[in-house]
Image (tube, helix red, strand yellow):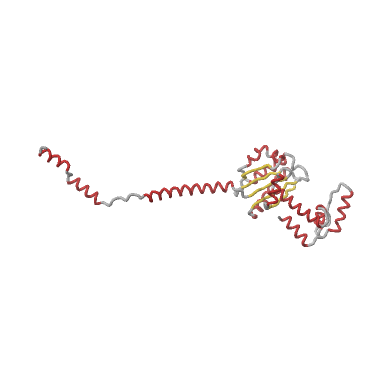
């Protein structure tokens, strides 16, 4: 190779003083620390945790919206059951017999009431019961039953619904009585209701009647006779109006005057049965 050509190439390959100084300065700086794999995974995990937390919060709201907090049943002859969440919004509205299905027919079978406030749904059902002729006589009555593990909430709902329904009926069906109860969803009531297609509230009432009827038998009376005795006990009431279609019914009712008294144990038992 020509010596002049070699010297020229060497000169081109040798960095200038400026380039050498820039390289020296860069090498003197501390190297940047690259993220280690565990740091990458930690960042991913943190993001995943935030996503799960957000999803969990949404899931919690969804769960509370569709979790049943209270069950309200309305019984005349139709039996209708409303399941309600903690916000007192209707989750489901179910007709428990054919009469109830007819009442709910124009409400999408109850589907139109889903998502509405409980009092609005109940008033709509009561209005339909009046229009269908179930609450149009002086002897008509509607039973409102509330089931809830929170007894304080159950009693509050009971009082609010009775007041609301009573207000509706005063204008639409003045002669109708509003009965109400707070019930526990016991095994007997659930089984009875499932077999007979009635609400737990009506099943609870049937259970009370059965227990009172058994108690009357132990006293040697019918349930109607014991009821008359119970009304005549003490000094607060001295007259009871009774209905009879046959002379022997009047005679039997008069005979109960010999067994009007109740023992303290019997009165306590009746109170316990009615309070459940």
The residue located at (86%, 58%) in the rendering is 258
Q: Quadrant of the N terminus?
A: top left
The correct choice, above or below, for 266 with respect to 108 in the image is: below
Closer to us: 252 or 114: 252
Q: Answer left or right for 96 relative to 12.
A: right
Q: Position of residue 81 (x, y in %)?
A: 67, 45
Q: Quadrant of the C terminus?
A: bottom right
Residue 159 shows in this picture: no
Q: Quadrant of residue 197?
A: top right
The extreme front residue here reads 1
The residue located at (86%, 48%) in the rendering is 244
Q: Position of residue 15 (x, y in %)?
A: 18, 44
Residue 71 shows in this picture: yes
The extreme bottom residue here reads 264
Closer to us: 114 or 187: 187
The residue located at (10%, 37%) in the rendering is 2
Q: Position of residue 250 (x, y in %)?
A: 88, 51
Q: Position of residue 154 (x, y in %)?
A: 65, 52
Q: Answer left or right for 255 relative to 150.
A: right
Q: Answer left or right for 146 relative to 211.
A: left
The residue located at (74%, 53%) in the rendering is 208
Closer to us: 58 or 192: 192
- Image mark count: 0
């Amino acid at each position: 190779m020509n010596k002049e050509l070699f010297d020229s190439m060497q000169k081109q390959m040798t960095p200038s003083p400026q380039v050498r100084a820039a390289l020296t300065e860069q090498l003197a700086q501390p190297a940047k620390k690259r993220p280690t794999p565990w740091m990458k995974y930690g960042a991913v995990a943190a993001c995943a945790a935030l996503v799960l937390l957000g999803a969990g919060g949404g899931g919690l709201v969804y769960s509370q919206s569709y979790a049943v907090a209270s069950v309200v049943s309305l019984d005349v002859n139709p039996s209708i059951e409303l399941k309600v969440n903690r916000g007192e919004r209707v989750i489901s509205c179910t007709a428990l017999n054919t009469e109830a299905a007819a009442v709910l027919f124009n409400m999408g079978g109850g589907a139109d009431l889903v998502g509405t406030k409980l009092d609005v749904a109940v008033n709509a059902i009561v209005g339909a019961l009046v229009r269908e002729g179930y609450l149009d006589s002086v002897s008509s009555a509607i039973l409102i039953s509330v089931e809830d593990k929170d007894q304080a909430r159950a009693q509050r709902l009971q009082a609010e619904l009775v007041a609301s329904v009573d207000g509706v009926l005063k204008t639409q069906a003045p002669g109708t009585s509003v009965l109400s109860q707070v019930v526990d969803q016991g095994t007997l009531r659930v089984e009875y209701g499932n077999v007979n297609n009635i609400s737990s509230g009506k099943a609870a009432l049937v259970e009370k009647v059965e227990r009172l009827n058994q108690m009357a038998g132990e006293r040697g009376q019918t349930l109607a006779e014991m009821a008359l005795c119970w009304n005549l006990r003490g000094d607060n009431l001295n007259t009871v109006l009774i209905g009879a279609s046959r002379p022997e019914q009047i005679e039997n009712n008069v005979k109960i005057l010999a067994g009007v008294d109740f023992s303290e144990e019997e009165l306590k038992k009746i109170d316990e049965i009615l309070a459940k």
